[in-house]
Image: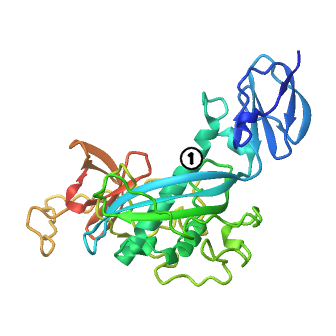
């Protein structure tokens, strides 16, 4: 008996709906006008079926098959992030919370499904949206931290007049670049930012007039925020043509500040230089997975036979015997963790007496004084 595959009405708004029942040797597929069905025989990406009714036969009936209904129209994704840090110039502790929404669209259903087909995922749609939210939160935390540190005050991000510049810069960095492949940003919905010193148990998001105002629903969804017509409300985002970058917004290539996301180690933020392979720099494509190579420090030359090794004099202002050793970029070091035990990390760079370290393979970095690391 031929079965009919169609999207469940409960999942009508889901970006991806995975058919939950077994599929036989052949079936009939009903595809909506705003979606595409990706068939996966033997846990591989197979036929892509467009709108209409189709009769599909599995090329390998002895193995199981699956079907994924992927929406090709924009869907809304919400985010809510909190970050804590200390302003280096004033020593003021700052806690920032930013919440909002954006619209994304699946640009390549086959590429999207190929990343998890065959894996035992029960909530595929929730996982994809969570990946997008996490990518936006990381980018936004980095951007807001840098602006507060440069302005030496949380008002650099909480004042309503700063919101258009923040949105413009966030879109320029493509905040969904760190999410799953096949997803593209359509436009930002709304964004609201609050700040305090972290002493309160909970940081509430204010409902200020004009701050949480969503974008105009009449705007075409096929245009991004940097290419919208001038009829867009100025309190949301400004057109690239008539926008004058605010004085507090640095051009590309200016130093950024390290941020810390909620739950991570809070350390003083210091300036770092944006590397050429930094994925948050406008116009630079994200590197392919596995393409980033970790450099190794050059070998130390051995002294000639019969000669004594040369010892560098201690730096001015340091105590003999406590002069820190400079570790090359890409080297492995050991650093005390939050539980008091030593953990392994990779040196990304040394700046003003602080090492930027990547702990494990999480991609998150922390700043540690030069005297606080031990070379492996």
Identified at 46% across, 63% down, the residue is: 206
Q: Percent x, y for residue 330? A: 38, 56
Q: Percent x, y for residue 18? A: 71, 32
Instruction: Please tell me whether mark 1 sits on a helix, a strand or a loop.
Output: helix
Against 121, residue 331 (above or below) is below
Q: Which residue position is annotated with label 1?
A: 131
| Occupied quadrant, residue 186 | bottom right
Looking at the rendered image, the quarter that the N terminus falls into is top right
Identified at 86% across, 34% down, the residue is: 30
Identified at 48% across, 56% down, the residue is: 138
Q: Which is nearer the eye, 202 or 55?
A: 202
Against 40, residue 329 (above or below) is below
Q: In the picture provided, is 17 more to the left or to the right than 148?
A: right
Does residue 255 show up?
Answer: no
Q: Which is nearer the eye, 44 or 201?
A: 201
Q: How is the image coloured?
A: rainbow
Q: Percent x, y for residue 166? A: 53, 71
Q: Residues within 10 Å of mark 1 (few under 14, many from 20)?
A: some
């Amino acid at each position: 008996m031929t079965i009919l595959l169609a999207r469940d009405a409960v999942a009508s708004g889901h970006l991806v709906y995975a058919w939950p029942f077994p599929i036989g040797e052949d079936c009939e597929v009903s595809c909506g006008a705003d979606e595409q069905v990706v068939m996966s025989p033997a846990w591989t990406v197979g036929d892509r079926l467009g709108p209409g009714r189709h009769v599909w036969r599995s090329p390998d009936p002895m193995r199981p098959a699956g079907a994924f209904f992927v929406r090709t129209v924009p869907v809304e994704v919400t985010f809510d992030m909190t970050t804590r840090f200390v302003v280096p110039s004033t020593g003021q502790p700052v806690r920032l919370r930013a919440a909002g929404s954006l619209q994304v669209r699946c640009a390549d259903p086959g590429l999207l499904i190929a990343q998890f087909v065959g894996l035992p995922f029960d909530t595929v749609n929730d996982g994809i949206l969570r990946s997008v939210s996490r990518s936006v939160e990381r980018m936004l935390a980095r951007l807001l931290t840098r602006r507060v540190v440069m302005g030496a005050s949380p008002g650099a991000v909480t004042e309503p007049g700063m919101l258009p510049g923040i949105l413009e810069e966030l879109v320029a960095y493509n905040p969904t670049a760190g999410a799953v492949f096949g997803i593209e940003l359509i436009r930002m919905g709304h964004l609201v930012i609050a700040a305090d010193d972290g002493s309160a148990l909970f940081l509430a998001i204010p409902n200020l007039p004009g701050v949480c105002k969503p974008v105009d629903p009449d705007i075409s969804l096929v245009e991004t925020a940097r290419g919208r017509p001038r009829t867009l409300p100025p309190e949301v985002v400004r057109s690239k043509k008539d926008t004058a970058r605010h004085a507090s917004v640095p051009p590309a290539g200016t130093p950024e500040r390290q941020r810390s996301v909620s739950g991570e180690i809070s350390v003083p933020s210091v300036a770092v230089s944006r590397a050429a392979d930094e994925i948050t720099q406008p116009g630079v494509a994200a590197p392919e997975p596995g393409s980033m190579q970790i450099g190794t420090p050059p070998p130390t030359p051995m002294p000639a036979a019969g000669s004594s090794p040369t010892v560098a004099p201690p730096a001015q202002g340091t105590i003999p015997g406590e002069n820190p050793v400079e570790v090359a970029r890409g080297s492995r070091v050991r650093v005390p963790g939050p539980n008091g035990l030593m953990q392994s990390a990779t040196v990304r760079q040394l700046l003003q007496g602080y090492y930027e370290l990547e702990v494990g393979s999480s991609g998150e970095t922390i700043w540690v004084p030069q005297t606080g690391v031990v070379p492996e």
